Every structure is written in C-alpha cells, then in structure tokens.
Image (cartoon, helix red, strand yellow):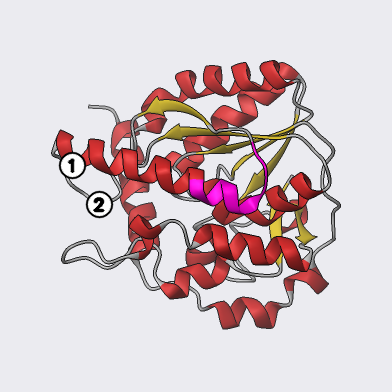
Amino acid sequence: MSGRPDNAGAARRAAAAAIDAEGTDEDEWRRARLPDSLPAIALPSGPVVVVAAHPDDEVLGFGGCISALVQAGVAVHTLCLSDGEASHGSSLPSDRALLAVRRRGELAAALDELGRLPAPVYAGLPDTALAEYEDEARVAIAEVLAAVGAAVCVAPWEGDLHSDHEAAGRAAQRAARDSSVSVWSYPVWMWHWARPDDLRVPWHRTAVVSLPEAAAVRKKAAVARFTSQLEPRGHAGPVLPPEEMAHHTRTFETVIR
C-alpha cells in the first residue's frame, strides 16, 4: 500500500479531531475586532449562485449577505450538494431518508426567512462522501452557473477542514474557473478550530461584509429554522450548540477571495 492513502486518512482524522474538540470562544473573536482589522468589501452584483455542502451551510456562512442581496434586488440562486442525511450518525437508510426530508424542509423555511428566493437546487450527492463525488459536484455547479448566467459563485472555503466543505469548495473553484466566474468562499467550521492569529487562515485574502441590521435579524431567524442541528441527537449533543451558533449570528460575514 502506498503512503498516500495513509496520509489522507491521517489528515481526515486530524480534521475530525479539530472539529470535535473544544472550539474557540466567540469572545476571543470579538476581541480580535475583525471588522476593524480586515478590509471591507461591498456585496457582489449578480446573478449570484451560493453553493452549500449541506442544508444550512449557505445560511450559516452567507445568509446575511443572501438576505441583503435579495433586498437590493440582486438575483440569488442556491445549490445544495447533499441532503445532510448523515448528520445524526445513523446508518439505517430509513433514518437517513427521514432526516434528508426534514433538512430540506428546514432549508426551505430558512430561505423564506431571508427573502423571496427561488427554490434551492439539490444535487442529491451523498453526505460525508462529497470528496468521492467531486467531479459530479463540479458538473452540478457548472450547470447552475450556466443556467442563471452567474457573475459570482459563493461556496464553502476549501480549507474549512470538514471534508465535504473542502470538496464543495474545490468543485466550485473548478466549475467557476471553467465558466470564467468569480469565486467568493465562506468559512463555517474555521471559526471553531482556528484562532485570530492562525497561520492556516489566508487572512491576506479575507474581507468583511457588514450586514444591514434587517439582514442580520433575518439571518438569526433563518438559522433558528435548522432545528435538527440545534437539538440534542439522542445521547449526543447538537451539531450546532449555542457556542457554535455565536460565530454565525454576528453583524458581519467574512469571505475569502
């Protein structure tokens, strides 16, 4: 056996450990004063396609901007690559099917909170296995970019440590490059495992979008719709406990370009 699979497996285990470990407190991020230390950037012009690995990523990472864009009259389209059916750990197909339906419903309700948006497009790729379906993800993203004449593609950051987020980010970068579309990336789990001086984060490519007050309020209402991720899972805690949600209910959002 070559060393490559072992290295990949070790990287996945290290990433999982970082996400499962106790994270960085939001107070530490507040003290970093990111809106003062990072450059500000205006909202993009459209049409904009927002890609997610799972139902909730697009709202957690970019929901305030989605709402502000909609209110500004910019066309915003969303594409979710998986149904998030593996978030509760069950291997039973029936459990996963029920959770997939629930999570699609939560996303629809969350997007309704953000504004008048088209129904999300679902690629139906398997949760936790997007790295194995990266080519299919690229094709799905490229199809939506072409269908709406996208000017900007917004996708998970390919350094987020979650393998699905990273695969979604890589697929979006490839699809956008082939289509000559600009890419903005949003972090999700980075706020958990990183710190303000973390050298793994490309701060030189990072910018802040200040949210109008109404957009920040609508985002809070939207994230509250993801009850499957906010409630305890049997003997396990919620996927998104309050300390994690604190990272995603700020008055600004952060993008990497």
Circle on res. 95:
1
What type of secondary structure mainly makes up the magenta span? helix
* Residue sitting at the far left: 92
Task: Place residue 32 in its image quadrant.
Answer: bottom right
Which element is circle 1 on?
A: helix
Q: Residue at x 48, y 66 (%)?
A: 192
Q: How many marks?
A: 2
> Which span is picked out in magenta?
109-117
- In the image, taking residue 244 as reference, residue 170 lies left or right, namely right
Circle on res. 88: 2
Residue 100 vs 27, above or below: the answer is above
Q: Quadrant of the N terminus?
A: top left
Residue at 58% across, 48% down: 112
Residue 118: image location, x then y, percent? 62, 33
SS at badge 2:
loop
Residue 202 visible in the picture: yes
Tell me whether the residue at label 1 lies in contact with that at label 2, contact meaning CB atoms closer than 8 angstroms.
Answer: yes
Q: Nearer the viewer, residue 185 or 47?
A: 47
Q: Is residue 212 left or right of residue 223?
A: right
| Quadrant in the picture for residue 234 | bottom left
Question: In which quadrant will I find the C terminus?
Answer: top right
